[in-house]
Amino acid sequence: MNGRDDMTKLRIAFMGTPDFALVALKDLVAAGHDVVCVYSQPPRPAGRGHKETPSPVHAWAADQGIEVRHPVSLKSDAEKQAFADLDLDVAVVAAYGLILPKAILDAPKYGCLNIHASLLPRWRGAAPIQRAILAGDDATGVTIMQMDVGLDTGDMLLIRDIPITGETYANALHDDLAALGGEMIVEALEKLPKGELVATKQPEEGVTYAAKLERAEAKLDFADDAASLERKIRAFTPWPGAYFELGKERIKVQAAEVTDQSGPVGEILDDALTIGCGSGALRPTRIQRPGKAAMDTDAVLRGYDKLAKGVVLG
């Protein structure tokens, strides 16, 4: 994406942390906007050495020579003043991780615009991508929102959808939505100073909340129906990774299919690792043993008789 001569160059602060946000930041810089400051979460311990590591947004911005700030809170008068002193046209927020006080929201000329990975008001909150897959939604998308003090409650400025199919995994959907969000925020900022964005209030009906993912959710409970377990596998790829237990061994499931077989809950029903569920049966097609590479299930089963017909899984 290249800057355009007819585009109004805006003075921007970008507020984001993970890879999802980085796509939009790169698109805004490529479009020719003046990103004068980046806000991101503080560096965190990462890797085997637990070395303090900057977020993807932080690392890229610093490499580009953009000032990076990483306060633990924006509530102090000093932080509010430091933000106001940037004299911004607009702030763009994407998966930042801090609540923005009203003084921050009101400081830029055009306020703060958020890139949210759902079709609002459905899936407000922390994990909209995974929750949409888990729920069996047939579509999700990106909403560009004018932020207010509520949790993803602001007026909608742009909204676009993406289908969810039985082949949709969270990692691929994440990348598609990140790319869409980058395109949409560039479009929104082109229209913003021209007064071409129409603010639409979110409907009161259809509100749902996308709670933060917890590791404990990743365990497959075979008392559930097979279709919901298959969605969980797709929603939890790559993190936290759906799994079942075989004794003390935790086996991750990266892909599976639903079958119309039936049998005792949690029992392996055949030599293809089809597992009885509360309704229907689930056949993992790609699994990963601890310390091993992920492999197609038939390759794992060869010479590994612990996953044999009749075994009951935890």
Image: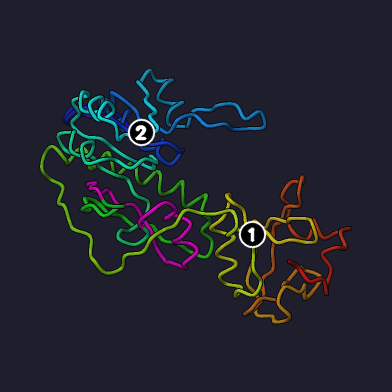
The residue depicted at 84 percent of the width and 68 percent of the height is 308
Residue occupying the point 13% across, 45% down = 196
Q: Horizontal placement of 75 versus 248: left or right?
A: left
- Badge 2 amino acid: Leu
- In the displayed structure, would residue 283 be above or below residue 52? below
Give x and y (percent) for residue 120.
30, 58
Residue farthest to the left? Answer: 195
Q: Is residue 23 magenta?
A: no
Which percent across, then down, holds residue 250? 73, 55
Q: Tell me the residue that label 2 is attached to.
A: 25
Identify the amino acid type marked 1.
Answer: Ala
At x 89%, y 58%, the residue is 303
Name the spot of residue 231 as percent of width and height, x first. 55, 65
Q: How many marks?
A: 2
Q: 191 and 232: which one is in front?
A: 232
| 43, above or below 206, in the image | above
Q: Which span of residues is magenta-colored?
A: 124-149
Q: Which residue is mark 1?
A: 255
- Residue 141 colored in magenta in the image: yes
